[in-house]
Image: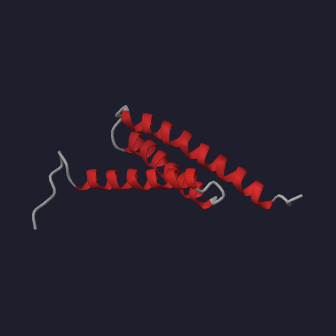
Amino acid sequence: MKETPLSGPGFYQGLAVGYMYVVTVLAWLMFKNPSVRYFSLLLANAKAASSLLSFGLFIFHQPYFIYPANGLVDGLLGILAFYIYRIQRRNAEAPIP
């Protein structure tokens, strides 16, 4: 088997496109089904993992600008998604008058 080239389109681009597809589907499902709180929890976890990975790459790999920029954006989106999840959970647990 041949080795994957280090530059250009390849394995990691495929992973990135797959991840973005899943994030888009989760956001769409949140929009279409606001009562299902697990979509926002999954999105919050995905964004938190991406944020932490980006900051880790900035610290331990190379100080590229894209790493903290993505870490900040994904971190804020993860916090927002988790906040939405908390609101959904609180509303689901509230007694119906």
Number of numbered discs present? 0
| 94 left or right of 53 in image | right
Residue at the image position 45 percent from the left and 42 percent from the top:
55
| 20 left or right of 14 in image | right
Q: Residue furthest bottom?
A: 1
Q: Quadrant of residue 39?
A: bottom right
Residue at the image position 48 percent from the left and 45 percent from the top:
51
Residue at the image position 34 percent from the left and 34 percent from the top:
64
Q: Residue 29: where, in percent of width, then height?
A: 53, 56
Residue at the image position 35 percent from the left and 56 percent from the top:
18
Q: Residue 61: where, in percent of width, then height?
A: 34, 43
Q: Residue furthest right?
A: 97
Q: Residue furthest left?
A: 2
| 70 left or right of 13 in image | right
Where's the N terminus, which quadrant? Answer: bottom left
Where's the C terminus, which quadrant? Answer: bottom right
Q: Residue 95: where, in percent of width, then height?
A: 86, 60
* Residue 67 higher or lower than 32, as above or below: above
| 22 left or right of 16 in image | right
* Residue 14 higher or lower than 71, as above or below: below
Q: Nearer the viewer, residue 10 or 6?
A: 10
Q: Residue 33: where, in percent of width, then height?
A: 60, 57
Q: Nearer the viewer, residue 94 or 3?
A: 94
Q: Nearer the viewer, residue 38 or 78?
A: 38
Its colouring scheme is secondary structure
